[in-house]
Image: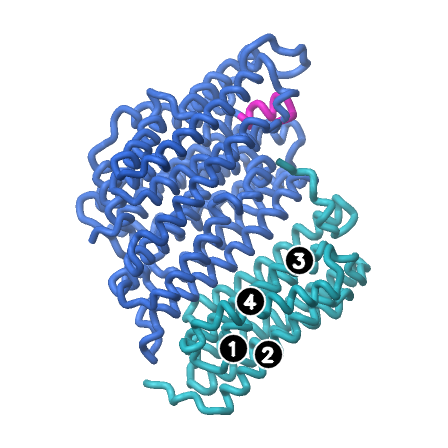
Chain colours: A blue, B cyan
Amino acid sequence: MSLLAPLLFVPAGAALGCSLVRSRRMMAALGVLAFGLTLAGGVALLRRVAAGGAVTEWAGFLRADALSAWMVVLISVVSLATSVYAGRYFQRDLAAGAVTPGQMKEFFILTPLFGCGMFLVVLANSLGVMWAAVEATALSSVLLVALYNRRTSLEGAWKYVILGSLGLALALLGTVFIYAAACQDSSRPLPSFNWSHLLTVAPQLNPRLVRLAFVFALLGYGTKAGLAPMHTWLPDAHSEAPSPTSAMLSGVSLKIALYALLRFHILTAACLGPAFSCHLLLGFGLLSMFLAAPFILVQENLKRMLAYSSLEHVGLICVGIGLGTPLTIFGALLHMGYHALTKPVLFFAAGNLHQSCHTLEMRLIGPGMVKLLPVTVLCLGLAAVAATGLPPFGLFYSELTVISGGVVAGQMTVSVLVLGALIACFCGMLRQFTRILPGEPKPRSDGDGRRMDGVPAMGLLLGGLLVFSVWLPQPVLDVLHQAAGIIGGEP
Amino acid sequence: MHPAPTSEIPAQLIALFAALMLVAQLLLAVQRMLLTSIRLFAIQSLFLAGIAAVVAYSHNAFHVYVVVALTLIGKVAFLPWLLDRQVRRMKIIQEIEPLVNFPTSMLICGGLTLLGYLVARPFTSLERLGNNTLAVAITLVLTGFFLMINRRKAITQVLALLTVENGVMLAAVALTTYGMPLVVELGIFFDVLVAVMILGILVYRIRETFASMDTSKLSQLKG
């Protein structure tokens, strides 16, 4: 049975369906249904890949290996949680007059398209199609960032579109150079621009052009992945987007750009040896982690702080891959998964706080939110504990895997630096959350204590996080090992 | 089917067109009038289409004609028309003073051109056609970045972005005889789409909300 094509058609169909129906409930239900189906498809794909290796369809146009299958599951989980949360979120926004019905419809049409674009990024075999799909996700998410049409959300969207387009122009240049590197020794057109084909001929590619291609891809896709110092759009876009969109941007979109970069990394490592690209990834990863820490500490806006925390996590993933041993790569991939389960909860809870307090400024929100919104704060607290990397949550294990993998590989300095950055970020998050959560609430007119908003979505993710922190099914482990092998350059 | 070895005339034509693209870019860097800037961009795109046409003709590569057609329709005709209409509607004629004044801009662009030639030197042997096309392509990317930093109007920033993308397209044509199947076409398609989207939605909304197109007023989000 065909597995890959439905992953593209189902969300596209949901977008079409949302453009036809009028009721908010129907649109929300369509989104949930679509991403529920893709999650089922993703799990089926994961099992098939774990058992039998890469799957191709449409004469090799679509291809899913272990890395793609893992990303498909992550996209589905985050999009599903977002769709579950978005229905009630926009009901409240509509009631408060923050959005018009037209803007809400725009959200429900664009979100499945955004998801569809991300599926195409991870399933496309041709590097050219992959680039185009990344561009498509950027375009659909820009409109989502600008949804509220406020002064600041326009500013955030403007920075996002300008920096994103510049980055993607560089990524296209990188793609051009890879193409040139592949076809320079023949006077005929390249037989195929498929990644799987390029990997088989990687040792014969022109090394100087491959080097240049990787640098441009790193700058280009790195911008989209929010790596420092190209991250400046990230806090603006994340804080100004509606909370469901922030969750998708932070939960998966950053990792999708990282995925595109990884495809270049694998090719470069196969052509030049792993040192060149690994060192670059390591450097950018460490820089991102260290840059995130002070900004978390001094941040006044809740969602901006969460965005900087994403920067830290993306940095850690890059470090894990840059260290280049099977153990650290495994840890990095695991970290992607746990982060995808954690970060949306934080953004959903931030969305609830935003709607109750009408601000994201932490000095205006806090203290004493635990008395006003006990359920939201419980979820927020649990997710915050997870995001700072404390046991028993999975992020603790994945961070530990990266750090100990670094020690085993003899990269003591890197491990110590990573540990330092993690501790700094931990302190920052702890300080910020103690400002708003405990204590006596300010007297205010709104925000009654009975609200259970967003509990299904947050409960789904937190439940998954708890279960998968202590138990990973065998197919997932197999796929992660396979994916780590692909990135590490094993045949 | 093997292509005939490139004869002299197409190679010279391509070198000429590439040089003219560079000239258009340098003029753009010191141009204050918005309408003239838009025309300069259209002319630059026209030369890009010319290069693609020469490549297509001399190699009998039919799908490169698609690139020519897309460039002509999208970047030479449609986008300039749209930008032109936007500028006239907003009654903005001149760019406000750029961050770096024009003589210094010219000097910086000259330096960036040198840098472009320096970066491209190791790869000249890989170029199929013409000389220095890759150098011009890299220069267009670099000066496009500079323009983007230097200018403050939304329209000029969009133009700068488009010239960066012209540079990328030129690199694609210069380095790969047959252009890149699909990728170049998709690239042009998305360029046009991005620009239309920025203009159609953001510039419009920014103007509504800020009553100007000055992006330096977009400075509330910090830290």
Q: Nearer the viewer, mark 4 or mark 3?
A: 4
Q: Return the mark for residue B115.
A: 4
Q: Earlier in the sequence, mark 4 or mark 3?
A: 4
Of the pair A112 and A262, the residue shown nearer to us: A262
Give, as a three-letter code, the residue at label 3: Gln
Q: Is residue A352 magenta?
A: yes
Give, as a three-letter code, the residue at label 2: Ala
* Residues at marks 2 and 1 on the same chain: yes
- Quarter-of-image position of residue B155: bottom right
How far apart marks 1 and 4 lie (CA) works out to 13 Å
Residue contact between numbered discs 4 and 3, judged by CB atoms under 8 Å: no
How far apart marks 4 and 3 lie (CA) works out to 22 Å
Q: Is residue A158 above or below residue A432?
A: below
Residue contact between numbered discs 4 and 2, judged by CB atoms under 8 Å: no
Q: Is residue B9 left or right of residue A412?
A: right
* Residues at marks 4 and 3 on the same chain: yes
- Quarter-of-image position of residue A446: top right
Query: From which residue to which does the magenta span run?
Result: A350-360
Q: Residues within 10 Å of mark 1 (few under 14, many from 20)?
A: many
- Residue at image point 38% right, 36% down: A77
Q: Position of residue B207 (x, y in %)?
A: 75, 49
How far apart marks 1 and 3 lie (CA) works out to 26 Å
Q: Return the mark for residue B85.
A: none
Q: Secondary structure at mark 2?
A: helix
Q: Secondary structure at mark 3?
A: helix
Q: Return the mark for residue B157.
A: 3
